Image (cartoon, rainbow, N blue to C red):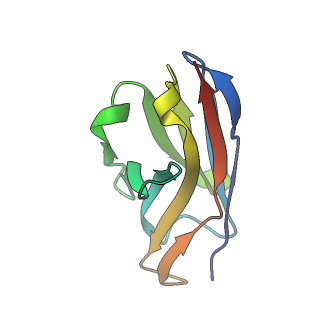
Amino acid sequence: QVQLVESGGGSVQAGGSLRLSCSASGTLIGAKTMAWYRQAPGKQRELVASITNSDLRHYADFVKGRFTVARVYLKNTLNLQMNSLKPEDTGTYYCHAQYIAGPVGNYWGRGTQVTVSS
């Protein structure tokens, strides 16, 4: 089993920045893909950004140019730098990891709240 714990959420004004972190209980080496999802009240969970173990990154169109995802292997951490935040970025942000080695499986964190005010 892998435990993922998100942190870094909070309340900011539009145009501000936040950096989310997802700390894994074990090494990231066995994680083929790691990703950030978000869910706004009354809406479905949606993919924000992902990164593979080959360092291939994918961003949802609505965050391109504003968010940056990165894996920090030495700290077993997945980060999401969020700049130029908009009120529509408000939601709960979840970390996800797909492990193909070690503890094989898909894992989710419990989420961290991001609130952007206009």
In this orientation, which residue lies closer to the viewer: 14 or 3?
14
Residue at point 39%, 54% (across, down): 46
Q: Locate the C terminus by quadrant.
A: top right
In this orientation, which residue lies closer to the viewer: 42 or 83?
42
- State the image coordinates of residue 64 (x, y, percent, origin top left): 33, 30
In the visual, does 65 lie left or right of 39? left
In the picture as drawn, the residue positioned furthest to the front comes out as 42
In this orientation, which residue lies closer to the viewer: 3 or 27?
3
As displayed, is residue 75 above or below residue 100?
above
As displayed, is residue 19 above or below residue 100?
above
Residue at point 46%, 41% (across, down): 69
Q: Locate the N terminus by quadrant.
A: bottom right
In the visual, does 98 lie left or right of 91? left
In this orientation, which residue lies closer to the viewer: 110 or 102?
110
- State the image coordinates of residue 4 (x, y, percent, origin top left): 65, 65
The image quarter containing residue 68 is top left
Residue at point 54%, 15% (across, down): 15
In the picture as drawn, the residue positioned furthest to the left comes out as 61
Residue at point 60%, 28% (across, down): 116
As displayed, is residue 11 above or below residue 70?
above
- State the image coordinates of residue 54 (x, y, percent, origin top left): 34, 55
The image quarter containing residue 19 is top right
- State the image coordinates of residue 42 (x, y, percent, origin top left): 48, 54
